Image (cartoon, rainbow, N blue to C red):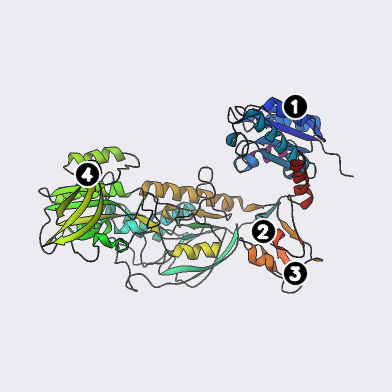
């Protein structure tokens, strides 16, 4: 016979986040009167070691078989409290959490009303906890190896870290070269270091590594499976150069081998983890026709200026520029174009190129028109100061249009400090174009069912606690496919993604979520509606029996299939109708 519930309830002060609005002592006293509650306590920080120790000690000493913690969002500390409950001898799936911070103290000002609401939330959690069933966690074996999609700096760094740990890596790059966008740069900020001094060596390390197989002119067309057991199809893909796209990069030295194992695209690879490092595209300034890009030869982008600086030829129509203008935030911080975000690197790229232009053309006048100056990163502010000391003039203003006057162009700009419109003649205008997601990101997102943010970049699982993870276990993000960033941050995130990918590879097994959907084959009609609605591809129709089966490794317990099933054949463990209705009745009857 199932033992009667013995529930421990623990109320967190969260410093003053909860205690400033909620009477924690009153909630604790109330919780002690609820049916099945054996003990009720409160503590300043329940997530701290002493707070967790309270749960463990009470569970052992009082024989608790269920635990309720009323504190912050379950997304923040549910794993922490589940682990503490388990160490105390309580099944981790007999733990329930009440959110009295985000859903209570942070959204209310009246202390009495906030306290009453906190009591109601605790009551509902206790009612559900009394009906929770013990679930068993399982493990699945891991295929040793990783797939890295994208051969830029992020992809190469992630591939090297995983390969150096002793695991095989399949690195897939759709172009005919490694290096990505960085291969098209001349020098980097803030040290003005030539890219040619370090990027070819990085490419060479990747191509020579015995554990890395490089696929150039290739793309991933299919991915199936789950964390620890992915299967991907790699097929040939015409390079941009072959299809008339992006010109060849500045750096191609040492890239003729085409793969550490001489691999050709075409076939299936099996891996345990996937790293997405598909990079970014630069904004097409033709979408802002008022700037005359593609019409006037005097108007170029920062990427085009990189090539000119590398070649040492800054002439326009055979003439050396005497007046050079930089326009920042082209394709960034633009609500009308649907790009409200800052691309983060444009200010530093402008400062870098302005200094290089001053060095190449010491007699030329260099002016930067800007909305704001955001010198992000280490030594950023100092680098900006160096540009101004070098004679670069910064003027705060919004550029409205560029038009031609003789063999020069005129930049019409509103000076937002002086409050007046001015016209500035120039021989060369450089548009500091921002970053945007690559169009291939949509294909990768569809293959892996990855969510993307409103701006089109891949969405991380949590911006603070899981910045390189995705909603799909075993799939990690590296570099500018997640958001605009500079090279140091790209490398840091790539190394973080590699470290995260190595966790399941090193362990050899992955835990399987126990709170998953299960199908009653006696009730299932085989309609397939659950297959259509599942965002993770967990349900599938059994070809022999004609009923739905749920892959427990893929299932995230979202419940979409359970609410869709017309036969009510799907039951979501840990969120059964009995448990949910008990919570509802507690809240309605409050």
What's the CA distance linking mark 1 and mark 2?
A: 38 Å
User: Residue 133, how many percent across, how many down?
Assistant: 79, 47
Farthest top residue in view: 25
The magenta stretch is: 79-86
Asked if residue 174 is positioned above or below residue 427 in the image, the reply reads below
> Pointer 1: residues within 10 angstroms few (<14), some, or many (20+)?
some
Asked if residue 452 is positioned above or below residue 134 in the image, the reply reads below
Precedes in sequence: disc 4 or disc 1: 1
- From the image, tell me which residue sits under label 4: 395
What's the CA distance linking mark 4 and mark 1?
A: 63 Å
Precedes in sequence: disc 3 or disc 4: 4
Which label is found at residue 560? Answer: 2
Q: Is residue 12 left or right of residue 182?
A: right
Q: Is the magenta stretch mostly helix, strand or loop?
A: helix
Residue 498 in magenta stretch: no
Precedes in sequence: disc 2 or disc 3: 3
The secondary element bearing badge 4 is classed as strand
Which label is found at residue 29? Answer: 1
What's the CA distance linking mark 1 and mark 3?
A: 50 Å
């Amino acid at each position: 016979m199932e033992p009667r519930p013995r529930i421990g309830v623990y109320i967190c002060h969260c410093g003053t986040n909860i205690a400033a609005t909620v009477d924690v002592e009153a909630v604790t006293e109330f919780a002690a009167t609820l049916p099945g509650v054996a003990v009720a306590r409160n503590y300043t920080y329940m997530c701290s070691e002493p707070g967790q120790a309270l749960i463990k000690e009470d569970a052992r000493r009082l024989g608790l078989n269920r635990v309720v913690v009323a504190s912050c969002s379950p997304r923040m500390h549910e794993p922490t409290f589940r682990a503490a409950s388990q160490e105390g001898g309580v099944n981790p799936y007999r733990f329930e959490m009440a959110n009295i911070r985000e859903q209570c103290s942070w959204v209310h000002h009246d202390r009495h009303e906030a306290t009453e609401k906190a009591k109601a939330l605790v009551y509902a959690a206790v009612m559900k906890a009394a009906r929770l069933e013990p679930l068993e966690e399982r493990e699945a074996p891991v295929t040793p190896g990783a797939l890295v999609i994208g051969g830029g700096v992020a992809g190469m760094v992630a591939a090297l870290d995983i390969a150096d740990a002793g695991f095989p890596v399949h690195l897939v790059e759709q172009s005919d070269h490694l290096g990505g966008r960085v291969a098209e740069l001349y020098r980097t900020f803030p040290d003005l270091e030539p890219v040619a001094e370090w990027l070819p060596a990085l490419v060479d390390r990747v191509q020579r590594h015995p554990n890395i197989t490089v696929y150039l002119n290739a793309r991933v067309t299919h991915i199936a499976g789950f964390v620890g057991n992915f299967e991907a199809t790699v097929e040939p893909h015409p390079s941009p150069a072959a299809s008339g796209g992006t010109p060849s990069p500045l750096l191609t030295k040492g890239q003729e081998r085409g793969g550490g194992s001489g691999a050709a695209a075409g076939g299936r690879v099996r891996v345990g983890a996937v790293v997405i490092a598909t990079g970014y595209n630069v904004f097409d300034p033709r979408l802002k026709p008022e700037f005359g890009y593609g019409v006037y030869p005097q108007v170029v982008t920062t990427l085009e200026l990189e090539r000119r600086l590398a070649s040492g030829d800054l002439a326009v129509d055979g003439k050396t520029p005497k007046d050079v203008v930089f326009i920042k935030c082209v394709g960034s911080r633009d609500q009308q174009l649907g790009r409200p975000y800052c691309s983060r690197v444009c200010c530093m790229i402008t400062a870098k190129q302005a200094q290089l232009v001053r060095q190449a053309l010491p007699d030329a006048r260099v002016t930067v028109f800007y909305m704001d100056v955001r010198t992000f990163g280490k030594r950023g502010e100092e680098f900006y100061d160096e540009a101004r000391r070098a004679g670069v003039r910064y003027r705060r203003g919004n550029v409205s249009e560029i038009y031609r006057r003789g063999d020069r162009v005129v930049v019409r700009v509103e000076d937002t400090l002086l409050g007046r419109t001015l016209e500035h003649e120039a021989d060369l205008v450089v548009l500091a174009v921002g970053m945007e997601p690559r169009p291939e990101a949509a294909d990768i997102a569809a293959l892996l069912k990855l969510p993307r943010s409103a701006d089109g970049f891949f969405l991380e699982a949590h911006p603070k606690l899981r910045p390189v993870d995705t909603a799909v276990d075993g799939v990690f993000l590296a570099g500018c496919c997640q958001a605009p960033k500079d090279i140091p941050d790209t490398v840091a995130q790539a190394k973080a993604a590699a470290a995260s990918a190595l966790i399941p590879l090193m362990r050899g097994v992955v835990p399987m979520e126990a709170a998953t959907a299960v199908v009653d084959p006696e009730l299932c009609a085989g309609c397939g509606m659950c297959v259509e609605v599942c965002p993770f591809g967990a349900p599938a129709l059994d070809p022999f029996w004609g009923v739905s089966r749920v892959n427990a490794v893929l299932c995230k317990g979202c419940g979409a299939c359970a609410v869709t099933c017309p036969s009510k054949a799907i039951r979501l463990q840990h969120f059964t109708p009995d448990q949910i209705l008990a919570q509802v009745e507690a809240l309605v009857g409050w």
